[in-house]
Image (cartoon, grey):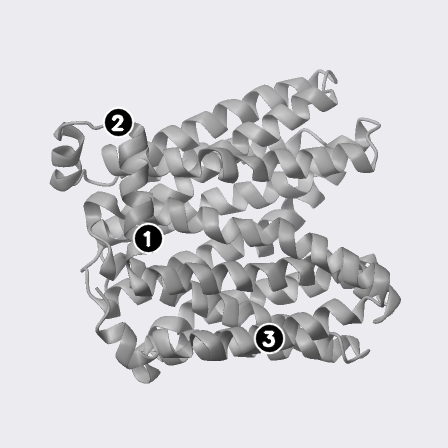
Amino acid sequence: MRLGGRFHRLFGATLVSATGTGMHAAALPLLALQSNGGPLALSLVVVAAEAPWVLFSLHAGVVVDRLDRRRVMVWADLGRFAVMVVLAVLVLAARVDLVQLVLAAFLLGVGQVFFDLAAQSAVPDLVVREPRHLATANGRIAAAESNGEDFAGPPLGSALFGVWNFLPFAGNALSFAASGLLILSIRPDTRAEEASAAPRRSVRSEIAEGVRWLFGNRTLRALAAVSCLGNVVVTAQFAMLALLAKEVLGLPDLGFGLLLTATAVGATAGGLAAGAVSRRCGPGTVLLTAKAGVGVAVAVLGLVADPWVAAAMMVLTGALMAAEKVVVSTLRQQIVPRAVLGRVLSSSRLVVMIGGPVGAALGGVLAGAFTVQVPYVAGGIFLVLVALAFSPALTNRALASAG
């Protein structure tokens, strides 16, 4: 399907930017360990990278709706480029400490919040706003994110760090510069200029409007709830995966990394196929089947001790999660008006993020009280029940009348 040069520049920028994100996601923890940091240092770096989604996502939604989304992405890339340049200089001078690493992770997280929300909100501006084109575009964006953040970026960042710890940060700076230049080459949208010139209300009232849109629409409300509950299970799955790989599957560290790679491979395939499958079977069928399918795959992970079966389940999990993400993104872009799309996306993302820490905590508690397989089996059964409970609101017929 031809989606046009403007979209393909966004696609290229997303792929390059995601690869940079994957590079520093692997290199920052390695640098923390190299700087004599222990488990506490690693956890602080991870928390600092995730905290901006909780702290700034609602405000970022307001910015994305007020300004030209192209400019928001360019500024996000420029900010991350500057952070990476400073960090690369500090690494070169051997002057890095834990405070600087945590601050860098936090600022990079802030940039990712603004870039991701602006990129997803910009998709309907760059392609025809109808299901077929939106699903295809969202599938390609999901594949770009998966390839960059999970498949290409982490091993590239780790490999470059092993050669010279300066290289992944210098390369990451170049990736953000290239992404920004690609976005800058996209022709501005006249609707963005009109939105920028519109009268301003208070930030609080604009955030409230986005929240009301989310919870006032039955379909959007159901999508947010299903995604949040799914995130509880998936976060528990990945939080306990290293332990499952070692204690149950008997895999070395390399095997654990390959399980994560298997997820990325599945996500790429699922993202690219989601549009075609959704057109053939309907978005509700894809959404509910994907949610229940992830539940079955997670439960199987807790019931088997064969690494090959586990790898197949990780591929399946990645593919179904990516397909679900594409369908959810497409539905939101169809339902929500352009003027409030950024705020609805940020509100939805915040609701989904709530499930993350809950899942990680529950996974740890269940694994500690019983065995590491228990959170997988319990989580898988729970997801199947979630799909059944929400099926009346998310059937093809219900989604066709959403608005």
Earlier in the chain: of badge 1 and badge 2, it is 2
In the rendered view, tell whether residue 93 sits above or below residue 211. Answer: above
Is residue 274 visible to us here? yes
Name the residue that disc number 3 marks.
295
Indicate the quadrant where residue 158 lies.
top right
Residue at left offset 62%, top offset 23%: 87
Could you give the CA–CA distance between mark 1 and mark 3, rounded to whole angstroms? 26 Å
Indicate the quadrant where residue 50 lies.
top right
Q: At label 1, which amino acid type do we have?
A: Leu
Give whichever of 323, 136 is nearer the camera.
Answer: 323
In the rendered view, tell whether residue 155 sits above or below residue 1. Answer: above
Determine whether label 3 and label 2 are within 8 Å by CB.
no
Q: Looking at the image, is mark 3 or mark 2 nearer the viewer?
A: 2
| Residue 6 relative to residue 365: left or right | left
Name the residue that disc number 2 marks.
202
- Image coords of residue 342 (percent x, y): 31, 44
Please give the label number shown on residue 214.
Answer: 1
